Image (cartoon, rainbow, N blue to C red):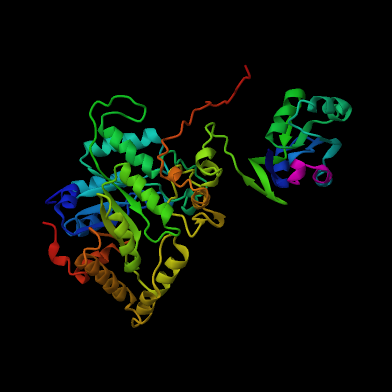
Amino acid sequence: MKSITKQKSLEEIEQQLEGLGRVYIIGCGTCATMTKTGGREEVLNMKDSLQGLGKMVTGWTVIPTACDEMTEASLRENNGAIQNANCLLVMACALGVHRVVSYIDKPAIPALDTLFIGLEDSPGSFQEVCAQCGHCVLGETAGICPITACHKHLLNGPCGGTNKGKCEVDKEKDCAWTLIYQRLKEQGRLDLMRKYHPLKNSQVTPRPRMTRIL
Amino acid sequence: MAQSFKEALKSGKFIVTSEISPPKGTNIEKMCHHIDLLKNRVDAINVTDHQSSVMRFPSLGGCLYIKERGGEPILQMTCRDRNQVALQAELLLAYVRGIRNVLCLTGDSIVVGDHKQAADVFELDSVQLLRAIRQLEKGKDLGGNDLDGAVEFCAGAIVTPEAQPIEPQLIKFEKKVQAGAEFFQTQAIYDLDNFSSFMEHARQFPVKVLAGIVVLASARMAKYMTENVPGIFVPQDLIDELASAPKGEALAKGIEIAGRMIATLKRDRVCDGVHIMAIGREEVVPDILAAAGLSTETVA
């Protein structure tokens, strides 16, 4: 699993840091490093940018996996520089921000926007494959998720916008239902495409979503 | 209106439907003019539902005006903007106000429209919407609760005979038939050979098929549609024919082509009727009907 992020504009970060002159920067060694949004290099670049804006950077660290509970120990090791800062600028996905917030009672400002949970399909190219809908249909759709891969998350086949295997919203994007059709046909399981899929339960786990291992 | 759309479908006559687009704003003058232009010339008038995801006066509102002015409306209903609660509620209102025909569509993507950052819904798809109508007819809502007064609709759907690959489209067509679709209005067709082979497949099912007709106003438009609009293919000979029209007469040529296509579809009994989508050229619909030799069939 990878949490796919993109960096906010420096302008937005500057706005959020208004009145906060001393900043401690936290990066993440896992997903944000792979997406080049919050690894060591990006953290150092951010340090330069913040100094360019007249901010004082009291310190920085790249936590191995920011969403992990080990984050607490990493933050403790850097306690001096963190206490010296007015705020934390977190260059991790929102899971990392949440983890940091649970340990440190200082304002935590996200430097990244969390886009989706995805896979790296080729170097540097990330694709959303699961929308975490709570009721998996992959067994009936040849392993291609129509909820995620179809722009309109349709369950009963392609819409009229399907265009020679591509999607009406973007000629670069594949039509999920054409892919599902082709793969089911290869598998000799086209009957699955004829099956009616009733409405999905939108409240499998009502928000805020929680679960507990019994 | 002499007969309901459902009766017209049953009568075995060659059906003609057309459509109007509600206004962007509160000035309904033009829409009412189009209703009056069409109401006695066609068997029913579709009202588009925020066509191309452009926010407008609602489809249901347009249908109410058609009823008021003595026409037979077909309520176009997409799944883009409303969840199951809102869709059902709107069907209840439509029914009590005398609207008896619904065309169930998935709907265009929100990002092609004029509110590109809006949330889309798509909780239901077109097949599920057809089934929802059939369930409401049984006096139950989608939550399984009893209704105090049920609905009854002539429900239809759309199909794209030029889709590539065609098999997924045919599978969905069948799912729509099984979900209770009584009629189909197709995406615009221009290749009659291809459409005839689609109809050979469609004829296995007890549904009425109205071929989609969009008048070609120029060779440039024809080329653009072939290259850019999903599910539309204009054969080269039609593009050449449009290009051969003298300057300023391309639209007249397009009307002639549309009329000729309709006349052929009717003469050869290829399908059960046509659905003329004017897309801003409602004024020429009577000319298309005349070119097809249908102007005498004015609905009394």
Q: Is residue B223 left or right of residue B91?
A: right
Q: Nearer the viewer, residue A1 or B66?
A: A1
Residue appearing at x 87%, y 30% in the figure: A81
Where residue B197 appears, as percent x and y from the top left, is 33, 63
Please say if B262 is above or below A149.
Answer: below
Residue appearing at x 73%, y 31% in the figure: A67
Where residue B36 appears, as percent x and y from the top left, is 20, 56
Q: Quadrant of residue A93?
A: top right
Q: Nearer the viewer, residue B117 or B212?
A: B212
Q: Quadrant of the C terminus of chain B?
A: bottom left
Please say if B60 is above or below B262.
Answer: above
Q: Quadrant of residue A78?
A: top right
Q: Is residue B57 visible?
A: no
Q: Is residue B245 left or right of residue A181?
A: left
Where residue A56 appears, as percent x and y from the top left, is 85, 38
Residue appearing at x 27%, y 74% in the figure: B256
Please say if A73 is above or below B17.
Answer: above
Please say if A29 is above or below B271.
Answer: above
- Dominant SS of magenta comes to helix
**Is residue A95 covered in magenta?**
no
Magenta stretch? A32-44
Where residue A162 appears, as percent x and y from the top left, is 46, 55
Q: Residue furthest front?
A: A188
Q: Nearer the viewer, residue A57 or B156?
A: B156
Residue appearing at x 70%, y 47% in the figure: A9
Q: Nearer the viewer, residue B29 or A103?
A: A103
Q: Is residue B94 visible?
A: yes
The mark total stands at 0
